[in-house]
Amino acid sequence: MKTCSKCGQDLDETAFNKNTKTKDGLASICRACASQYYYNNKEHILARHTQWRIDNKEQMYAQNKKYAEEHKDELDAYYNFYRKTHKEQIHEYGKQYREKNKDNIKARNNDYYATNRERISDTRHLYYLRNKDRRKLCDRRYRETNMGKLSNAKHNAKRRSFGFNNINDKQFACEVWHHLHLEDDHNFCISIPDFIHKFVPHKNNDINQMMSINAIAIQYWLDDLW
């Protein structure tokens, strides 16, 4: 039994929160009194905790990092279990967060891309080269869906409006043009997936880059055609 210093009642030890700083390892006031105190002083307590986290940011980071390293397996098991049992809640929370912070997320992503553009481009290019078959399979599956058929129909209509009716009429699940500039000034387009055109460097004044993306585009078109 233990006496609560707030209400003066003699209660079982299970009625007290744990506190490692006391001799008996228990708080001086019972759970009921502690809950009532928090309810009456909630705003003040939250403000105090917020200010403490701001003033002790580095200390908190070091403590959390140390705890995470010492309890890595335990935390991984807990997080995996939580994600499996709370899929809908996590999905809904992420959806609400993205909707609420749409502008901040966009600005952050733009800043990151601007700072790491070359590294991202090299990584995407390397991924494409290593996963050609997988990407082609994904494109074929997409073209079989209603959304893919609609995208192809719009894309073909756009190409016909520009007068491209030959080799470049091959259907792809994207709406991206790549112009092949020939020596005799006859230019024509090949429809290629957006991820190729976006992440493979091809400056017009860099002949090596242009030759590289032209070879990739033509090879992609031929592989998918045959």
Image: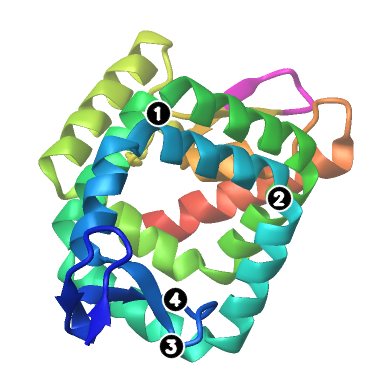
Residue range corresponding to the magenta coloring: 182-188
Of label 1 and label 3, which has the lower sequence position? 3
Q: Secondary structure at mark 4?
A: loop
**Pick the front one: 192 or 49:** 49
Is the Cβ of the residue at disc 2 closer than 8 Å to that at disc 3?
no
Magenta region includes residue 141: no
Note whether 161 is above or below 100 in the view shown.
above
Residue denoted by label 1: 175
Q: Position of residue 65 (x, y in %)?
A: 65, 71
Asked if the residue under mark 1 is in contact with the one under mark 2, i.e. CB atoms within 8 Å, the reply is no
Cβ atoms under marks 1 and 3 closer than 8 Å = no
- Local secondary structure at mark 3: loop
Q: Which residue is mark 3?
A: 24
| Residue 71, above or below 218 | below
Label 1 is placed on what type of residue? Glu
- Are the two marked residues, 2 and 4, in contact with CB atoms closer than 8 angstroms? no
Left or right: residue 155 compared with residue 209: left
CA–CA distance between discs 2 and 1? 51 Å
Callout 1: 10 Å neighbours few (<14), some, many (20+)? some
Q: Amino acid at mark 4?
A: Asn
> Where on the picture, by quarter, is residue 15?
bottom left
Q: Earlier in the sequence, mark 2 or mark 4?
A: 4
- Magenta-span inclusion, residue 186: yes
Left or right of 88? Residue 3 is right
Could you tell me if the residues under marks 4 and 3 are in contact, i.e. CB atoms within 8 Å? no
**Mark 1 falls on what kind of element?**
loop
